[in-house]
Amino acid sequence: MAHKIINTVAGIILPITVIALTVTLFFMFRPENCTVLFYLNVGYTVLLEAIFFGYINLLYRKITAVSTPFIAVFGIYSLYYVIAGAGWMTLYSLILSHIFSLKIYIAALIILTLLWIIISVLTMQADNRFKEAGDKLNERRHTLEYYTQKIALLASRYEKLCEEKGIHYATESNNRTVLDRLKSKIGFLTPNVLNNEMFYSQLTAMLDRCETIIEETALAPEDALPEWEKKMYRFVNNSIDELDMLKNMTRS
């Protein structure tokens, strides 16, 4: 509750109060004959303060559409714009109003505003593309981690099954069972392989086949175990060859 009250004060009440006091000060010290320049300066000052407080409020909000670096860069652009706008407004009002026409003043403000908007939008566009690429990479990393955890679980199940059935099937010193070869192969895959949409379906189908072989091996009679050992061996070899083929297709 207290946090919500503080956010309301800082995000709404404070900016409105500052803007209201600024407008009050302008009108307290307004000249006897108010010109267009006076009202223009009032409006532009309110705009600069709104940008300043808007950015401060942005810092405390969780925005998923843009990245944290963009918010920092946008803050720098906004600060430069506020300083440049306030500086030009002060310089023109105090010194240059007798030299340059009001059109020059307004044109400079418009150009400054357009530059700030264009640079901010282009930066946001680039940031959005970068963020989307990063999000996709994280999604692929999590997907690949799922497959890695899944094959590790299946390899553990198969190892226990081999112990129960008396199957001592190891092809290399580092592999307790033949399925550990496939586990190692999937464990060394990188997220970029998932750029190929076929990888999702192929990996899913591969793990489904592996699970089916394990379940059928568990139900097989003792005299049929050698045949199921050979099926697992062929499955692992074929799966590794299939993964290599898909990786080569991804590189090309």
Image (tube, helix red, strand yellow):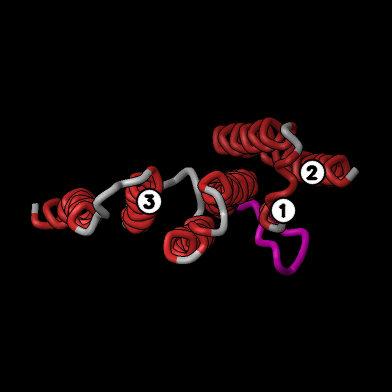
Q: Position of residue 143 (x, y in %)?
A: 58, 44
Q: CA distance from mark 3 to mark 2?
A: 67 Å
Q: CA distance from mark 1 to mark 3?
A: 61 Å
Residue 179 is a magenta residue: yes
- Which element carries disc 1, helix, strand or loop? loop
Quarter of the rendering containing residue 202: top right
Q: Amino acid at mark 3?
A: Asn
- Horizontal arrangement in the rendering, residue 234 relative to residue 54 (left or right): right
Q: CA distance from mark 1 to mark 2?
A: 9 Å
At a point 38% along the width and 43% down the height, the residue shown is 36
The residue that mark 3 highlights is 41
Farthest left residue?
A: 1
Quarter of the rendering containing residue 29: bottom left
The residue that mark 1 highlights is 189
**Counting residues from the N terminus, which is met first, the one under dot 1 or under dot 3?**
3
Q: Nearer the viewer, mark 3 or mark 2?
A: 3
**Counting residues from the N terminus, which is met first, the one under dot 3 or under dot 2?**
3
Q: Position of residue 230 (x, y in %)?
A: 77, 41
The residue that mark 2 highlights is 243
First to last magenta residue range = 165-180
